[in-house]
Amino acid sequence: MAGGEENCNLMRAFANLIERLILTPQRNGKLRLMQAYFRETPDPDRGYALAALTGSLDFRHAKPGLVRALVEERVDPLLFRLSYDYVGDLSETVSLIWPAPEHGPANDPDPPLGEVVGQLDAATRATLPSIVAGMLDRLDETGRWAFLKLITGGLRIGVSARLAKTALAGLGDVPLSDIEEIWHGQKLPYEALFDWVLGEGPRPQNDDPAPFRPVMLAQPLGDTDLETLNADDFAAEWKWDGIRVQAVGATDSQDRPVRRLYSRTGDDISGAFPDILEALDFDGAIDGELLVVREGAVQPFNSLQQRLNRKTVTGKMLKAFPAHIRAYDLLVAGDEDLRALPFAERRKRLEHFIGQIESDRIDLSPDVPFNDWDALAAARADPASAGAAHDADAVEGVMLKRHDSTYEAGRPKGPWFKWKRDPFNVDAVLMYAQRGHGKRSSLYSDYTFGVWRESEDGPELVPVGKAYSGFTDEELKRLDKFVRDHTVDRFGPVRAVRADAETGLVLEVAFEGLNESTRHKSGIAMRFPRIARIRWDKPTREADTLDNLVRLLPQRKTGVTQAG
Amino acid sequence: MPIRPADLLHPTPAGLYCPPGDFFVDPVRGVERAVVTHGHSDHARPGHAKALATPETLAIMASRMGAGHAKKAQAVAYGECISINGVDVTLVPAGHVLGSAQVVIEWKGLRIVVSGDYKRAHDPTCATFEPVKADVFVTEATFALPVFRHPHAAEEIAKLMTSLKRFPERTHLVGAYSLGKAQRVIKLIRETGYDEPIFIHGALKALCELYEAHGVALGDLRPATINDKARAAKNDFAGKIVVGPPSAFSDTWARRFADPLSSFASGWMRIRQRAKQRGVELPLVISDHADWDELIATIREVDPQEVWITHGRDDALARWSELNGYAAKPLALVGYEDEGD
């Protein structure tokens, strides 16, 4: 355990911190653990820990594949696979299975976290394997686990970057939004940041000319919210089905242009979007939705997915999936910070600002006019007739924004609401179940389901999707038991479940939309499928047919002439 | 014609059966004659006409299932060789829980050792495992994955004692199965020099007394009940150790304690996600089963012609056996859960 007799700068202290974080369910307990660590641990090690907790460390060459290769040099690959399948987490599997070095346990003292980070930072592709293997030989099991989580990115210990920043803010008396505001200009290991939060130094400057501004988010509209809200106070616009981004253009002190595209959490995703960057020929910060737009028509979300989670992009992809920003808001124009202005004012400024931009990669998200809530409900139900036209399939719902709302970081209660469209539902039959990973590694928690279609031998089930959410822990236990009791075949972690016209389980699946797919036997792919209800009562033969489902496919986009 | 191992012992739906001796080992349902390796409920079941086991195991069976669990119970001490229809049977310590035994079966020069559940690590509450050379070694495989490497139990108990000092305002609830694990955990706590009362759930009482009667001193044990007097005195077990079966901790029973800190002593706690899944804040990796290193060290010592694997992760242990020159056969026995861990 961290603290007390131990040296708090060591890898062991960090390992103990993250182990305790993973086992501590309460948010406040997690905050206390992080704050105790930040107080007890000196610079620079606490800064590296903060970077790890906020996902700001990136060791380019350290990939899970490298770790697997190292372990498979030492352990029979089949035994490793069986173990990995059971444990469900690569770092944990490797840390447990890693054999003691042949020359006996290492005598090297436990390294400080800063030294570990320093070694990894200095590593080249060629030297990294021996550095990683040396560290794994040197550390104990918990240390190995923490080290592997650190280098393979994404600790996944139930602590979001936001929670880690909240812990930091709580060290002193600093609002979280202040930390988010300057966060992206800070350099590892964040010494000035800690000094400021602890009242031992001035507020650090964010000297990035194109910084990220913390994003304002909307609350979901509750069932009864409309009864208490006045339609005259709000503006409405479409909620587009892309990803929320912030596009910033500026010039640095030497008058060179600086352009950045940030995700809504402030990750710099510029590298993968040179087409967007080229369009940021302005001095300001736009809040908008990233979409793929071809020939003036918004493409289905899976087109955008081709462009996401990449560090770079090929010319072919740029052509096939051209990126686009549909602007919602204007945060900065020139030197002027607009965030304290009311939305109605910002909206006017945005319209003007967009009008000045030459590129057609950036356009304005249109207003959805309405007189009362019924009119807005009708627009939400039928966006095509309410102005979205051929882009209606890309509308996820409507956004409500108070005319007088200032732009506040976070998810304040009251000024903005999102009112999503009702999801689609289908009754499908459970066909296969797979053991979950991590927390659910002992439960069959991932379900593949199918619908009926006619074949030469009569009706048969064809898989149409996979869902692993939407049920309670109690329901999960019952589902797991159902799977175990009705297993007809096993393939590794997957079990085939009895599913025919007489026996089986009907799952009511909710989903956001359908796409055509060549990868699935059924020819369709579902978006965000989840279990809406478990129909223990419903006979399998009454489940839906593929024909019913195919009717929901979006019509081919107008405006798209020839693909490729 | 030389006899084949399967002539002496083979799996049946009721469990491992020895045709020449006409007896079963740990049958999963009532049979004419059963040899029982140890008292966990998946191995020791009621309804046999004749049950043969160590005196300790028979005492455990009587305590859990009543004296009438079998029509006739036959106690056989460790090392005593008896003949059943011409087949020699000897019980040898397995180190799993009090009274646990391996069954050594010999007939016409062929020797099969059925390990039952076993471990090699030190356990002050039961006799230590003794390896016996065999032609066929029938082993369990509960923790037969190379990720299962149990740390020293004393180090795990030290974590508990450290936490008790650091969080004196919290009741430390230690989940431990009622036969074997609970007594071992209590004994290990005593070995650290802790002599304050340890509070136990009612389900542990009879077995703790039985261990005491067999010479395993567990110190001052008291019931973990709160009466009105205690409640008035705000005696809510803050800073105390409470040991109970894990199932009790998800019950309303656990809500009586001061800010309970949930701990669980089990080999499964090696996997953090398992601990997290169960809401365990302080996992104690203490197991009464052999870990991966113990399993393979034992196979090497017993040095059999064939390894038969009863239950657990047979795929991984079979793979290791194959890689190391032992013929291996999973028996795919059903009905054995991991009550003891």
Image (spheres, rainbow, N blue to C red):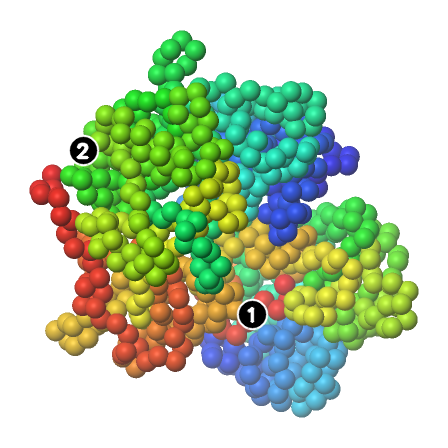
Which chain does tag 1 point to? B
**Amino acid identity at mark 1:** Glu
Q: CA distance from mark 2 to mark 1?
A: 58 Å
Name the residue located 67 percent from the left edge and 41 percent from the top edge: A33
**Outermost residue toward the top in this view:** A254
Q: Position of residue A344 (x, y in %)?
A: 40, 39
Q: Which mark is residue B337?
A: 1
Q: Nearer the viewer, residue B1 or A462?
A: A462
Q: Secondary structure at mark 2?
A: helix
Task: Decide: is A564 above or below A128.
Answer: below
Describe residue B87's horizontal placement relative to residue B251 as left or right: left
Name the residue located 19 percent from the left edge and 43 percent from the top edge: A297
Q: Quadrant of residue A276?
A: top left
- Identify the residue position indicated by label 2 in the image: A319
Describe residue A351's horizontal placement relative to residue B194 as left or right: left
Dot in front, 2 or 1: 2
- Check if mark 2 and mark 1 are on a common chain: no
**Outermost residue toward the left in this view:** A562
Q: Secondary structure at mark 1?
A: loop
Q: Position of residue B31 (x, y in %)?
A: 57, 86
Which chain does tag 2 point to? A
Give the class, few, some or many, for how many residues have Cα within 10 Å of label 1's Cα (few <14, many ≥20): some
Q: Position of residue B52 (x, y in %)?
A: 66, 80
Q: Nearer the viewer, residue B131 or A311?
A: A311
Q: Nearer the viewer, residue B309 or A56?
A: A56
* Quadrant (top left/top right/bottom left/bottom right) for the C terminus of chain B: bottom right
**Amino acid identity at mark 2:** Lys
Q: Quadrant of residue A169?
A: top right
Name the residue located 34 percent from the left edge and 47 percent from the top edge: A237
